[in-house]
Amino acid sequence: MSNKNIDWSKLDFSYIKTDKRYVSDFKNGAWDEGRLTEDANVVINECAGVLQYAQTVFEGLKAYRTQDGRIVTFRPDLNAKRMEESAKRLQMPIFPENRFIDAVEQVVAANADFVPPYGSGATMYLRPYLFGTNPVIGVKPADEYQFRVFATPVGPYFKGGAKPITLRVCDFDRAAPHGTGHIKAGLNYAMSMYAIVDAHNQGYDENMYLDSATRTKVEETGGANFIFITKDGKLVTPKSNTILPSVTRRSLCYVAKEYLGMDVEEREVFLEELKDFAECGLCGTAAVISPVGKIVDHGKEIALPSGMESFGPITKKLYDTLTGIQMGRLEAPEGWIHEIKV
Ligand code: PLP
Ligand code: COI
């Protein structure tokens, strides 16, 4: 199926340069028609808005090879809409939804040989992003922007694949200091670099961020939302307007209800109640569902009953159902699967 000679089963979540990427420039108040290019380098002025004041937003979605050999993406319209919200918050021009989807289609089709085979454990990660390109020295938005999409085949986000991970309750805030935690902006992620390196140095896989106002409520991790399963089989997920509105999480809430007949609660989740949950998982495009086995709160260990060896049973069922929909083993809800014509 592929002529790229990649050992798909060995991939981790790293960048691999693929053949073509999409570029469109915004100048004099309008987007140009856009194009595919083989040039993976971006050359911009030393004073570009993105370099000085981090005026950049991004998205993340995947292309999947289905059981019957098609290539599909999952709900790309939601990524386009979320990028629109992110761009508005950073005073950037909107890249229209239909053009966002067209750009994704073009990049996937142009790099179809890099879409890992069905069942390989790898997928193609797509990274749309938008940044200010012209010189800006006073604190104000740029006038010129570039929108790009590149593709890279990836394996599991966390080393060890389905092995449960360990989190630590984090004392740092991940959101930039302007309440932008609910959008996907570069600065939010830059703000998490210290915390993630510190967590890794101390032997943890990721950080559990808390609400910065009271430090009593669970928010999300550096790159994924939380889902919890109660002892009576309910799905609970934190309600907060300072976390990223995850496409995976929104999809899982629907899948839990409509496919698995579960009760679903989106509500505040307190640090204090972690010890009462039966299972915990991180959900996101990159994380898919990554099981959490242990959470350490300032030396106090909270061991999830599902343990450190494998997925909890309900988390596993959610994982199988979601990936079943994404890879064509199960019928998808209307509009979720976007087929790419190659
Ligand atoms: N939260 C953060 C901070 C993320 O970076 C991501 C990944 O995009 C998510 C949550 C999950 O969002 P999604 O399911 O849309 O990928
Ligand atoms: C994603 O899941 O798409 C993410 O953006 C997570 C991480 C790679 C930042």
Image: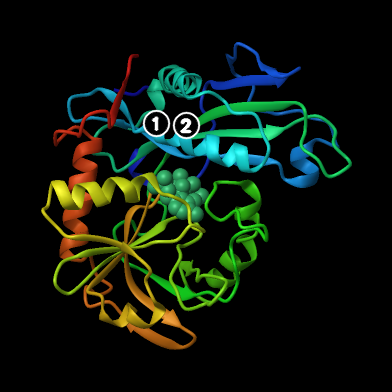
Image: 101 above or below 231: above
Could you tell me which residue is drawn at 40 percent across and 49 percent down? 246
The disc labelled 2 sits on which kind of residue? Ala
Which quarter of the rendering shows the C terminus? Answer: top left
Label 2: element kind = helix
Residue 87: name its quadrant. Answer: top right
Q: Which mark is residue 80?
A: 2
Residue 7 in view (yes/no): no
Q: Which residue is mark 1?
A: 76
- Near-viewer residue (248 or 341): 248
Could you tell me which residue is drawn at 75 percent across and 26 percent down? 144
On the image, the x and y values in percent for residue 180 come to 60, 53
Tell whether label 1 touches label 2 (CB within 8 Å). yes
Which quarter of the rendering shows the N terminus? Answer: top left
Residue 87 in view (yes/no): yes
Image: 83 above or below 304: above
Could you tell me which residue is drawn at 19 percent across and 52 percent down? 256
- Near-viewer residue (299 or 110): 299
On the image, the x and y values in percent for residue 80 come to 47, 32
Could you tell me which residue is drawn at 50 percent across and 45 percent down? 14
Image: 60 above or below 280: above
- On screen, residue 188 versus residue 284, left or right, reads right
Please rate how many residues cluster around mark 2, counting C-alpha atoms within 10 Å: few if below 14, some from 14 to 19, many from 20.
Answer: many
